[in-house]
Image (spheres, rainbow, N blue to C red):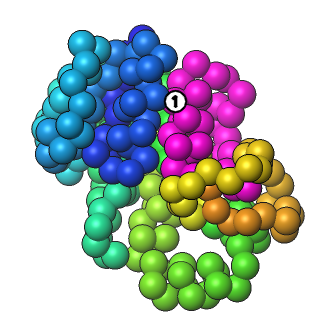
Amino acid sequence: MKLTIFGATGSIGKLAVLRALKLGFEVVAFSRKPSKLAIRHSNLQLLAGDVNNLSNVSDAVKHSDAVIVCIGSAKLSGDVRSKGTANIVEAMKQHQIRRLICQSTLGIGNSWQNLNFYWKYIMFGLILKNVFQDHGVQEQIVNQSELDWTIVRPAAFIDQKPKKPVKVGFSFLEKKLSLTIARKDVADFLIAQVTSKQYIRDTPALSY
């Protein structure tokens, strides 16, 4: 099976590439500068491009069986997630590719109720307001795409995995959350969805 991973040089994307290769997938790693991955593998194709360019995106997905989106930006403004995802959806429709896994964030939709005061009103209300809004539009695009999508909503990223089980797909009423998740657990979950039908047309959240 062949995957295209958008945002392949990001902190989640790189781990997703490594996980996919470990499991035997063929991977197209798409990024502005994919050489930053510093990974060489017989099943890995590095592809440079811009998600805002539909032609670039179309070339990236045309021979793939599934697509994973974990695009982002170092800037706290802009609409790269939503506009890039719109191009990805369009390219997938052009090439009749059905399976889409998209990384969003905990807090979108009814998962807003899982957040505490700090995340609602300081981080997403002020500091990351534009990023949060971009994720919201991104989710709308995916939700309306009619593809076989899964939107993954992880909590805040951490590097060190604690000795706790991952909580997956919990209710928006769940309050006993750390509101953190290790990047590796997010990447592993994204890749696991490629061959799973459990969360098709669903928005599973991840936290400890």
Name the secondary structure under disc 1.
helix
Q: Position of residue 161 (x, y in %)?
A: 62, 51
Instruction: Give the position of the C terminus as an image quadrant.
Output: bottom right
**Label 1 Cα neighbours within 10 Å, binned few <14 / some 14-19 / many ≥20:** many
Q: From the viewer's perspective, is residue 24 above or below residue 107?
A: above
Residue under pointer 1: 191
Does the magenta run of residues contain 85?
Answer: no
Q: Residue at x 68, y 45 (%)?
A: 204
* 109 on left or right of 11: right
Q: Position of residue 137 (x, y in %)?
A: 46, 61
Q: Residue at x 71, y 73 (%)?
A: 115
Does the magenta run of residues contain 193?
Answer: yes
The quarter holding residue 106 reads bottom right
Would you say residue 93 is visible in this rendering?
no
Q: Which residues are magenta?
A: 182-208
Q: Residue at x 46, y 80 (%)?
A: 129
Q: Position of residue 166 (x, y in %)?
A: 73, 46
Residue sitting nearer the eye, 202 or 6: 6
Would you say residue 36 is visible in this rendering?
yes
Residue sitting nearer the eye, 200 or 42: 42
Q: From the viewer's perspective, is residue 119 above or below residue 56?
A: below
- The type of residue carrying mark 1 is Ile
Q: Position of residue 54 (x, y in %)?
A: 19, 40
Q: From the viewer's perspective, is residue 106 above or below residue 192?
A: below
* 63 on left or right of 182: left
